[in-house]
Image (cartoon, helix red, strand yellow):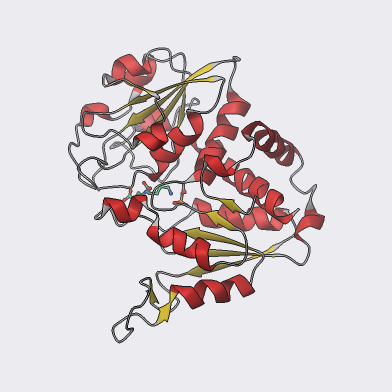
Amino acid sequence: MNKFTSFADVPDYKVLLNKALEIKANPFGYQHLGKNKTVGLIFFNPSLRTRLSSIKAAYNLGAQAWVLNAGADSWTLEMNDGAVMNGSTQEHIKEAIAVMSQYCDVLGVRTFPGLKDRDEDYNEVVFNKILKYATVPVISLESATLHPLQSFADLITVAETKQTERVKVVLTWAPHVRALPQCVPNSFADWFSEIDWVDFVITHPEGYELAERFTKGARIEYEQKKALEGADFVYAKNWSSYRDYGQVITQDPSWMVDTQHMALTNNGKFIHCLPVRRNVEVADAVLDSPNSLVVQEAGNRVFSMQTVLHEMLQ
Ligand SMILES: NCCC[C@H](NC(=O)CCC(=O)O)C(=O)O
Ligand SMILES: NC(=O)OP(=O)(O)O
């Protein structure tokens, strides 16, 4: 793999998943791979899990890691080709990414969507420039449309927790106070619609339909309670509208996942990528119940990143 930006970059998810489970069981087994190697991490947006789990993943492989907060502590970057840089931008992305490629063997980049111009976001204009100018393999740490390391960690979590051969996994929209990207649900759909042992259902209010290129024909059920019936895993996440791009259409609190919602499931496990707005997206009683896997899931972010780094460094 010389890039990891979506499910399509994975040659065989079963092989990758088995490798992740093996690495989780023996996290320091490949320390030779990272010897004299450096992982560069660039963040244009905030992060807790992605930043720290990526550093930990590099260390587990015997590699070094550096982090640049491009939004805060480097020069202000110009993204447009042909720009006359007589304004506030100080360095072009072209040099910046080429130079940073000199300082690492793998580059991870986080660039959230603007949520204003759908074409710009869904054409991954910024991330594609990074892919173009990088001279080392690139890992998405969440782009404008996808968050593949999260979905891979979610897959590890479901795979290691499931009690039956087949499982029902429900992705439910949940309310929020802000307009959030569609990256996490897009990516979850991109991955989980491809897993042959998963019965995958998406539920959301009208107007929150995700891009079909990621849902890939997955079952959509507009009645949340009906969707949750018999679920083995409930994945809650807010997102803003793709149709009315970046808009908040409703904040209907009845969509908040609480114990009544979970009572409809098959003693379902609860998952969420975090950070989560308690008692807005999900009730305390669900997050604090033994069926909540959110911390285990965040722990698996180390192994999704470590497995991808393993593939790139070997
Ligand atoms: N990386 C995981 C999620 C990141 C982002 N969440 C947020 O921005 C939440 C911020 C807030 O709660 O105000 C998202 O939904 O894509
Ligand atoms: N889930 C996730 O990506 O968290 P951070 O935004 O804190 O990295």
Residue sitting farthest toward the front: 82
**Residue 42 visible in rendering:** no
Residue 80 drawn above or below residue 221: below
Q: Residue at x 77, y 67 (%)?
A: 36
**Residue 7 visible in rendering:** yes
Q: Nearer the viewer, residue 124 or 52?
A: 124
Residue 95 lies left or right of residue 314; in this view the side is left
Residue 288 drawn above or below residue 10: above
Residue 126 x, y percent position in the rendering = 40, 62
Q: Residue at x 65, y 31 (%)?
A: 14
Residue 185 lies left or right of residue 24; in this view the side is left
Q: Nearer the viewer, residue 183 or 177?
A: 183
Q: Nearer the viewer, residue 230 or 192?
A: 192
Q: Residue at x 68, y 39 (%)?
A: 20
Residue 125 drawn above or below residue 28: below
Residue 115 lies left or right of residue 45; in this view the side is left
Residue 111 lies left or right of residue 224; in this view the side is right
* Quadrant housing residue 152: top right
Q: Residue at x 55, y 26 (%)?
A: 195
Q: Nearer the viewer, residue 152 or 24?
A: 152
Residue 33 x, y percent position in the rendering = 78, 56
* Tally of numbered tags: 0
Residue 253 x, y percent position in the rendering = 21, 31
Residue 153 x, y percent position in the rendering = 56, 39
